């Protein structure tokens, strides 16, 4: 039976990801979801979410608008909630190999770890390799529709600050139901643009079972043209696939920040830390002041 008591904590661990105008805290672009995995503000999302954010950033720049990467965190009080906008000045793509299922796994392993700037103490979700079975009850929590889901100060539709909770079941394991090490989880939950990066969570224990990648999209036809709708049945990478590599990466990350949560310059980062992965933004040495707004 679904444990409703886990819902407030689950929602508090999910963040929307996008852009603000430089020096502002109001979201102007929301491109996906992430979830916190450590009290210091480390989060996981799909790598293509930041590809989308980067494209939006370049588009705004062509229009003469300077923007900043931001995470938008929903924080609850006794009678109401608020949205907190926090800079993101550090992130890395994660690539891994699991020989046992290498012939089946996606060519691009679509994961990114980032960190919300500043000295933080956030709630977070736990994830370990956990047995996943067909028809297990699951939640997906995030911001489907991106900016349409997160609507602070929206005059036409009214405010909506907290992440959206969806309920469903595990309908398939990838590459097959009999896999001892499933790389993926297929659900019967409908996702749309903005769902990417959301956690797939056991609805009874809050254990993270997977992370949303994409959906099985449906075909739509208009004017004799067949296209694909950006909506479909959500599937994601399983915790069997990313649990250990993510934990190892977080350990590396922790050596790249000072005790106030400021990224160190590349000269100060220990030599045992690889600097070959993707960074957002690309030049972290030009980071400005680090604080929550």
Image: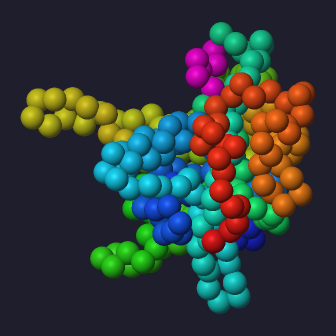
Q: Is residue 32 magenta?
A: no
Residue 172 image offset from top left, x and y in percent:
60, 32
On the picture, is 156 further left or further right than 110? left
**Can the viewer see residue 171?**
no
Point 65% across, 10% down: residue: 103
The C terminus sits in image quarter: bottom right
Point 39% across, 79% down: residue: 158
On the picture, is 220 further left or further right than 260? left
Q: Nearer the viewer, residue 178 or 29?
A: 29
Point 63% across, 39% down: residue: 283
Residue 228 image offset from top left, x and y in percent:
31, 34
Q: Is residue 108 magenta?
A: yes
On the picture, is 10 further left or further right than 257? left
The N terminus sits in image quarter: bottom right
**Quarter residue 281 falls in:** top right
Q: Report the span colored magenta.
A: 104-109
């Amino acid at each position: 039976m679904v444990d409703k008591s886990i819902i407030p904590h689950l929602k508090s661990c999910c963040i929307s990801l996008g852009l603000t105008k430089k020096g502002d805290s109001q979201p102007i672009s929301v491109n996906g979801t992430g979830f916190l995995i450590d009290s210091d503000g480390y989060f996981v999302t799909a790598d293509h979410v930041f590809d989308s954010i980067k494209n939006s950033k370049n588009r705004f720049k062509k229009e003469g608008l300077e923007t900043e990467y931001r995470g938008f965190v929903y924080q609850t009080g006794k009678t109401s909630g608020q949205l907190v906008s926090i800079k993101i000045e550090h992130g890395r793509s994660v690539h891994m190999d699991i020989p046992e299922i290498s012939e089946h796994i996606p060519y691009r392993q679509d994961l990114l770890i980032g960190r919300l700037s500043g000295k933080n103490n956030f709630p977070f979700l736990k994830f370990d390799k956990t047995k996943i079975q067909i028809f297990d009850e699951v939640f997906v929590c995030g911001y489907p529709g991106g900016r349409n889901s997160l609507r602070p100060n929206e005059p036409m539709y009214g405010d909506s600050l907290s992440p959206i909770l969806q309920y469903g079941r595990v309908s398939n394991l990838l590459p097959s139901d009999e896999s001892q090490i499933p790389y993926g989880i297929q659900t019967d939950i409908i996702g749309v643009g903005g769902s990417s990066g959301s956690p797939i969570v056991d609805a009874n224990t809050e254990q993270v079972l997977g992370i949303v990648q994409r959906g099985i999209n449906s075909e739509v036809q208009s004017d004799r043209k067949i296209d694909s709708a950006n909506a479909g049945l959500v599937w994601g990478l399983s915790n069997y696939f990313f649990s250990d590599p993510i934990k190892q990466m977080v350990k590396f990350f922790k050596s790249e920040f000072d005790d106030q949560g400021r990224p160190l310059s590349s000269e100060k980062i220990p030599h045992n830390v690889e600097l070959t992965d993707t960074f957002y933004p690309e030049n972290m040495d030009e980071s400005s002041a680090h604080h929550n707004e």
